[in-house]
Image (cartoon, rainbow, N blue to C red):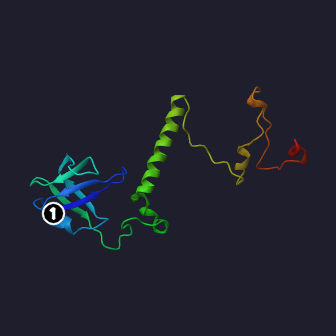
Amino acid sequence: MVFIELNDGSCFKNLQVVIDKSAPGFEEAAKSIVGASYMFTGLLIKSPAKGQLFELAVNESNHNVTVCGHSDGTYPIQGRPNAETLREQAHLRPRTNTFGAVTRVRNNLAFATHQFFQQRGFLYIHTPIITASDCEGAGEMFQVTTALPEPHEPISKAKLQDKLKTPKTAEEIKA
């Protein structure tokens, strides 16, 4: 028998795949190491062992194991990679549980935020980025203010100041 811990990155826990000697592709799977890519056909069963609820049993003649991509000993994620390895090889970050968990949390937070505002009639739009760059008169398009009116006054009472063209005077700074 061969045991393989399979993870596609969609969840934190791995799925244990138990491959019997009689399964087609057993020899190729037995030679593979960490980082290989697989395709399995088997039966998802309740696990008799502790540690996981389910496992994939590949133990019949109509089941199959295919190693789609081999890996060698130079694959950088052997065991637990250190932070320096992940900084140097950023494309491997999503394959770790830490970055996978962060990605799932960010996804849920973004989804909840968008859902909150969508349910209240807000629109999600990509607005232009306002910068101090004034190329070909584009800086005249926007006026930016941080001097908002009192809460009971309309927004039209806001004191506009052209942040892109003129600095505040000493009197405006004191006010």
Give the labeled residue for mark 1: 26
Q: Nearer the viewer, residue 59 or 139?
A: 59
- Which quadrant would residue 123 be assigned to in this image? top right
Tell me if residue 96 comes above or below residue 104 in the rendering.
below
Picture coordinates of residue 150, whole percent (x, y)? 78, 30
Picture coordinates of residue 19, whole percent (x, y)? 17, 58
Instruction: State which quarter of the image contains the C terminus.
Output: top right
Question: Label 1 amino acid?
Answer: Phe
Q: Nearer the viewer, residue 24 or 168?
A: 24
Q: How many other residues sit within 10 Å of disc 1, few (<14), some (14-19) or many (≥20)? A: many
Picture coordinates of residue 83, whole percent (x, y)? 48, 65
Compared across the picture, whether 86 is left or right of 154 comes to left
Residue pictured at 54% horizontal, 28% vertical: 121
Q: Nearer the viewer, residue 53 or 94?
A: 53
Residue pictured at 45% horizontal, 56% vertical: 99
Tell me if residue 164 comes above or below residue 37 in the rendering.
above
Picture coordinates of residue 92, whole percent (x, y)? 42, 63
Instruction: State which quarter of the image contains the N terminus.
Output: bottom left
Residue pictured at 74% horizontal, 31% vertical: 155
**SS class of the residue under badge 1?**
helix
Residue pictured at 21% horizontal, 69% vertical: 31
